[in-house]
Amino acid sequence: MRSFTRRVEDFVCEHCSAQVKGNGYTNHCPQCLYSKHVDVHPGDREASCGGLMEPVHIEAFGTGYKVVHRCIRCGHERKNQAVPEDNFETLLLIIERETKAKNRK
């Protein structure tokens, strides 16, 4: 597996239009938690898909959380660590959506 490539890039979220200031580790919008399918390996920008990656699941990870993203174009999934800058209310909304979906089954 190739190593991580750090890229300091600012971007405008294609889902919610938030202005995001990158720090070299930023891989999703801290407001809506959407990402973009641009990497094969973190930071390489070699994925040709370019689809939006929807935050579909939140899982516990140590004392924090990981956000599971699924590409709405090709279905590729990737886990990304939640960071303190992430909107905690959005994390809770995703968990609530998951819980409601499970209860309907």
Image (tube, rainbow, N blue to C red):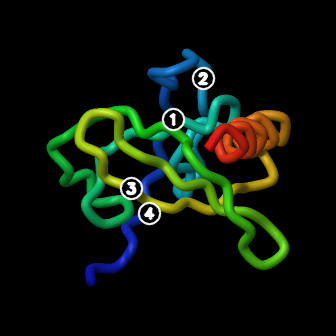
In this view, the residue in front, 9 or 16, is 16
Is 63 positioned to the left or the right of 59 in the image? right
Residue appearing at x 78%, y 39% in the figure: 96
Please say whether residue 86 is visible from this viewpoint: no
Between discs 4 and 2, the one toward the N terminus: 4
Which mark, by number, is residue 19?
2
Residue appearing at x 73%, y 63% in the figure: 65
- Measure how far apart labels 1 and 3 are at the Cα level: 23 Å
What x and y, as percent, mark residue 60?
Answer: 74, 68
| 22 is higher (above) or lower (below) than 76 | above
Q: Amino acid at mark 1?
A: Asp
Q: Amino acid at mark 4?
A: Arg
Q: Residues within 10 Å of mark 2 (few under 14, many from 20)?
A: some
What x and y, as percent, mark residue 8?
Answer: 48, 49
- Measure how far apart labels 4 and 2 are at the Cα level: 20 Å
Which mark, by number, is residue 10?
1
Quarter of the picture holding the N terminus: bottom left
- Measure how far apart labels 4 and 3 are at the Cα level: 20 Å
- Measure how far apart labels 4 and 1 are at the Cα level: 13 Å
Between discs 1 and 3, the one toward the N terminus: 1
